[in-house]
Amino acid sequence: MSDSTTDPVLSAASSRPDTAVIWTATEGQVDNFGYYALCVAFCWLLFPLAAMAVRYLRTALHCYELTPQRFKERTGILSRQTDELELYRVKDIAIEQPLLQRLFRRGRIVMQTSDRSTPQVTLNCIPSSREVAHLLREQVEKCRVMKGVREID
């Protein structure tokens, strides 16, 4: 009975064009290197090991997802929060590559948006950041054409 042809909610959700995931990734652990080194140095206190585990989980569970019309960011360990950004609201995309991230072929993507709740979205420690930024730009342009949104200066 769980067939999508008999369940109108499932069939409507699966027919939406936004359900296709184009790209997905998690935040990389490279940015936490200094924090982890400090925790290991003071591991005899036991508290730093717990703090390191929490930081690891928080970073590992920070997920990014790109669909044809939206960018989704999921955060949280026990309680999860999902932020969605309509791609037509993206005004600018920049790539930053701090030295440590650059050594591991990662980077930070910063999107300036016209969204009131999130005027700036940062994707931290992303592998192949240039390719991902290019993919984001392509999806933003496709979404703008679909919505009929023109460039804002």
Image (tube, rainbow, N blue to C red):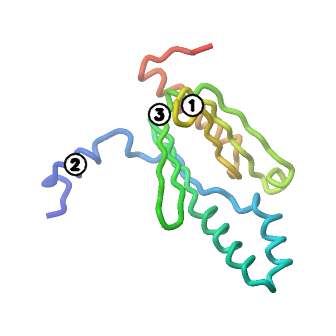
Q: Quadrant of residue 56?
A: bottom right
**Residue visible at 71% across and 52% down in the picture:** 125
Q: Quick check: 120 left or right of 32? A: left
The amino acid pointed to by label 1 is Glu
The residue that disc 2 covers is 11
Q: Secondary structure at mark 1?
A: helix
State whether residue 36 is above or below residue 119. below
The amino acid pointed to by label 3 is Glu
Q: Cα distance, mark 1 to mark 2?
A: 28 Å
Towards the viewer: 131 or 71: 71
**Residue visible at 56% across and 62% down in the picture:** 61
Task: Nearest to the eye among marks 3 and 2: give it.
Answer: 3
Q: Secondary structure at mark 2?
A: helix
Towards the viewer: 144 or 111: 111
The disc at residue 7 is none
Other-residue count near label 2 (Cα within 10 Å), few / some / many at <14 / 14–19 / ≥20: few
The amino acid pointed to by label 2 is Ser
The total of numbered circles placed on residues is 3
Q: Are marks 3 and 2 in contact (CB under 8 Å)?
A: no
**Residue 83 in the image: x percent, y percent?**
49, 45
Task: Nearest to the eye among marks 1 and 3: give it.
Answer: 3
**Residue visible at 81% across and 86% down in the picture:** 44
Q: Quick check: 63 left or right of 16? A: right
State whether residue 124 is above or below residue 152. below
Q: Cα distance, mark 3 to mark 2?
A: 23 Å
The residue that disc 1 covers is 138
First of labels 3, 2 by sequence position: 2
Q: Quadrant of the C terminus?
A: top right
The residue that disc 3 covers is 86
First of labels 1, 2 by sequence position: 2
Q: Quadrant of the N terminus?
A: bottom left
First of labels 1, 3 by sequence position: 3
